[in-house]
Image: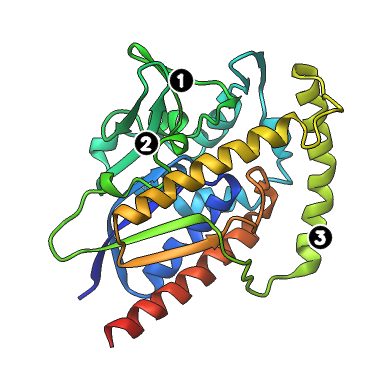
Amino acid sequence: MKQNISLVLSGGGARGIAHIGVIEELERQGFNIISVAGTSMGAVVGGVYALGQMEAYKSWLYTLDKLKVFGLIDFSFSAQGMVKGDKLFNTIKAFINDANIEDLNIPYAAVAADIINKKEVVFTEGSIYDAIRASIAIPTVFTPVKYADGLLVDGGIINNLPIEHVKRQPGDILVAVNVNAMIPVDKPVVCQNVMEVKHSLYRQKIKDFYRQLYTVKPPNHEEKLGYFNVINKTLNLMTYHTTKLALEKYSPNILVNISHEYCSTYDFYKAEEMVEAGRYAAKNAIDAYKEGLD
């Protein structure tokens, strides 16, 4: 009989693509995922999995360079955020249909933060796309989402590893995936030639992205880190501490750790590499768990 697991997936930008590899390895080893909760990129992967569309989503991620990923960025030129996100979500909706969370085959929860009412908002019903859009609204990058009398942004600023919101059942085990771990990078073997091609394509696109960024906020040459890097590092610090607090309060049966140094928040061109990183980290964590049982 398969062991049931309740799965919690952290936010972490492009590092969150590793969740796909973790899920694939868990299923390969006979685990049965009965519920999932996530924040930001964890909400994305968890939601796509709950929809039963993870393979289609992974295949799309693997073609991001060919689809000119930066063509999916719809600049808002707004003080609230640089990117609206409509273009990205409309593209995904072309091959993954929306659904109400309460109609999914397994319980699902996504976390966002209400910056007006200063509270956590947990989506367990309603449109899964609306839940994901709110959960990934990185402050100053994606425009926030209006919600009742509030304004929602990325849930990582308040709860980046929402262990308390995954629905548990008797006899299950708790599995948490942290893609912001303060550990050295431990990479599986990947095809360096393929990755180098993707890196070169990405470098040109990131130059275009910064060019657009600086039309919104001109660079200040006195800032050693630069505007964009300061935002990124600040958010990384917040998400690191919210994750640390969650792990201090709750003890998952299996904790899959992936180094925060593996890639940056916006390195989505590394999709194949990150899936393999997740698979590799999951295998090691599962092996350690099984050794502990013995």
Q: Earlier in the sequence, mark 3 or mark 2?
A: 2
Q: Is residue 90 above or below residue 281?
A: above
Q: CA distance from mark 3 to mark 1?
A: 37 Å
- Give the structural element (helix, strand or loop) at label 2: strand
Q: Which quadrant would residue 51 be assigned to in this image?
A: top left
269 with respect to 122 (left or right): right
Give the number of the disc on residue 55. Answer: none
Look at discs 3 and 1 and give the one toward the viewer: 1
Location of residue 111 in the rendering, given as x and y in whole percent from the top left corner: 37, 36
- Give the structural element (helix, strand or loop) at label 3: helix
Q: Depth check: give the residue in front, 32 or 168.
A: 168
- Would residue 53 be visible to someone looking at this image? no
Give the number of the disc on residue 145. Answer: 1
199 with respect to 67 (left or right): right
Q: Earlier in the sequence, mark 2 or mark 1?
A: 2
Q: Earlier in the sequence, mark 3 or mark 1?
A: 1
Query: Dividing the image into 4 quarters, which one contains the C terminus?
Result: bottom left
- Give the structural element (helix, strand or loop) at label 1: strand
Q: CA distance from mark 3 to mark 2?
A: 35 Å
The residue labelled by disc 2 is 111
Q: Depth check: give the residue in front, 27 or 10.
A: 10
Q: What residue is shown at x 70% (from left), y 41% (from top)?
A: 67
Identified by mark 2, the residue type is Val
114 with respect to 74 (left or right): left
